[in-house]
Amino acid sequence: MRTLNMSNDKGRNAEVHYVNHKIKSSYTFVDFSGQPIVNKKYIKSTSKFDLDSLVESYGSIEAVAEEIISGDPEIDMEVTGQFLQNSSRVYVNEDENIVYRIKKTEKVYDHLGELKEEREYVQKKSNINGEIPIRWTGKHIPKESFFRKFVSMHTYRITHDSGLKYDFLFDMATKLSEQNAMMLIAGGEQGNQPLIMQDSGKPYRAFLEGRVKGEQYLLLMHLTNMELKPIPQQTEKTEE
């Protein structure tokens, strides 16, 4: 199980576990024979059979069209349709050749999708399970407001592995449930940094949600890096 170092409102911390929170669907997709449908990756084509390569081989787009009518020059009979078991990501250049030295940049966009800044990429290290625990900031937001304002990209369930940690997390969930609110948690010494779940991972703002039923609790951590904002309305200019 994956772990994170978390503190509560009293400044006491504990190492707890987090797992993906997935709700099982009551629906099952099957084929005509009643067998469950399984998603698989397969090879659609290779770079030697894409449009640019075919145009280079036959001289013009018109010639490629004629060849497609009379045959199947766009299909690699040796590999097209083969299923992929294990694959790795590689970087290619404009000529679709593998490159081994790359320079990464980070692009920042505003809420209108326009590029604000392009800067050198800096590898970020995970900050959820170090010496400095994740802070209980005390900044609350009503649940209804949270789901209207933010897009929850990932949701994790925080769990215990001992009686003491049960009391630790149950107390958190109870306080949040009573307030019917989400609470911002953050990393860093000042408790103002987004959470980075793994090395080279994306930074996320994190919010805790608590639910309690009797002696049972559910403590959820919602990660978001997308905030919903209204599009500014353009005012019409009137001529005097």
Image (spheres, rainbow, N blue to C red):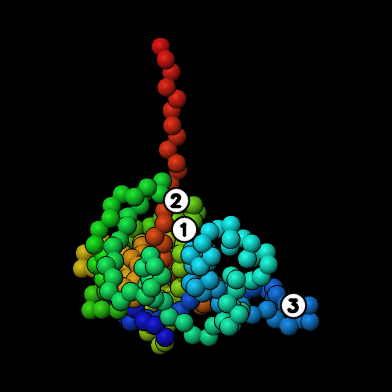
Res 151 label: 1
Left or right of residue 41, residue 176 in this image: left
Q: SS of the residue at dot 1?
A: loop
Q: Residue at x 53, y 59 (%)?
A: 60
Mark 2 or mark 3: which is in front?
3
Q: How far separated are the C-alphas under marks 1 and 3? A: 33 Å
Marks 1 and 2: in contact by CB < 8 Å? Answer: yes
Q: Is residue 136 above or below residue 87?
A: above
Residue drawn 29% across the image and 66% down it: 104
Callout 3: SS: loop
- C-alpha distance separating marks 2 and 3: 39 Å
116 left or right of 47 in image: left
The amino acid on which the numbered mark 3 sits, given as a three-letter code, is: Asp
Residue 138's image quarter? bottom left
* Residue 29 at x, y percent in the picture: 70, 75
Occupied quadrant, residue 68: bottom right
Residue beneath disc 2: 228
Q: Badge 3 is on which residue?
A: 31
* Count of marks placed on residues: 3
Q: Hey, what amino acid is under mark 2?
A: Leu
Of all residues shown, which one is farthest toward the bottom? 162
Tell which circle, 2 or 1, labels the residue nearer the N-terminal end: 1
Please say whether residue 214 is visible from this viewpoint. no
Quarter containing the N terminus: bottom left
